Image: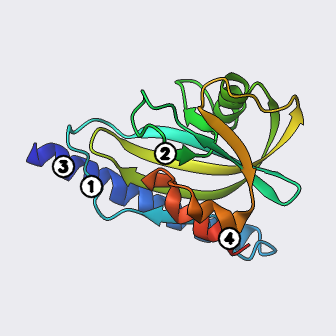
Amino acid sequence: LRQNVFSIRLSLLFSYLHYNIFSEVCKQIFPAVDSAPIFFYNDSMSNRNGADMTQVVAAIIKKDGKILACRRPAHKKRGLLWEFAGGKVEEGETCEQALARECREELGVTISVGALFAEKVHAYEDVTVHLYFYEAEIVGGEPKKLEHDEIRFVLPEELGGLPFCPADRDVLEKLKNQ
């Protein structure tokens, strides 16, 4: 177990360093970009079972100044907590492809995936996730509750009043301050 924890922490350190180096290189290549996407690093990175990190994407879907929030079903892990639409990146998919697929499956909508808004690694008891939060726009369909108990568009300053999954909470503050 100690070796697995060390391995996970070392892997996360390399991911964190890789991201920061990549951000600096991007700033040099594209000087017009004044900031890179935010990366949130959770200090308690080891999950309890030593499993590999799961790549997860989430959509920040805006409409009329509001942001789409989705409540997880009671029978799922982290049941009845709110989240942004999205899910696991499957093998062979890009983050953008995974996000478009997840929004079709969960909401019945077609989206246009925009810029990376934030990135975060979070360790739950059962899984460690590397989340990529993308800005997205609905280009086809109306959101439906295909996999969630409830969905609603919420003003950014009201997001903090909903009990969100712990992995999403740091992003709420950034959305509120935009």
Which residue has dot 1 on it?
9
Dot 2 crowding, Cα within 10 Å, few <14, some 14–19, many 20+: some
- Looking at the rendered image, the quarter that the C terminus falls into is bottom right
Hey, what amino acid is under mark 1? Arg
Hey, what amino acid is under mark 3? Val
Q: Are marks 4 and 2 in contact (CB under 8 Å)?
A: no
Which residue has dot 2 on it?
81
Name the mark nearer the viewer: 4 or 3.
Answer: 4
Pick whichever of labels 4 and 3 is earlier in the sequence: 3
Name the mark nearer the viewer: 4 or 2.
Answer: 2
- Asked if one can make out residue 22 in the rendered structure from this viewpoint, the answer is no
Dot 4 crowding, Cα within 10 Å, few <14, some 14–19, many 20+: few
Which residue has dot 3 on it?
5
Pick whichever of labels 2 and 1 is earlier in the sequence: 1
Dot 1 crowding, Cα within 10 Å, few <14, some 14–19, many 20+: some
Name the mark nearer the viewer: 2 or 1.
Answer: 2
Which residue is drawn at the image coordinates 29% and 38% (left, top)? 126
Residue 14 horizontal/vertical position (percent): 37, 57
Q: Alpha carbon of mark 2 to alpha carbon of mark 1: how far?
A: 27 Å
Q: Are marks 2 and 1 in contact (CB under 8 Å)?
A: no
Dot 3 crowding, Cα within 10 Å, few <14, some 14–19, many 20+: some
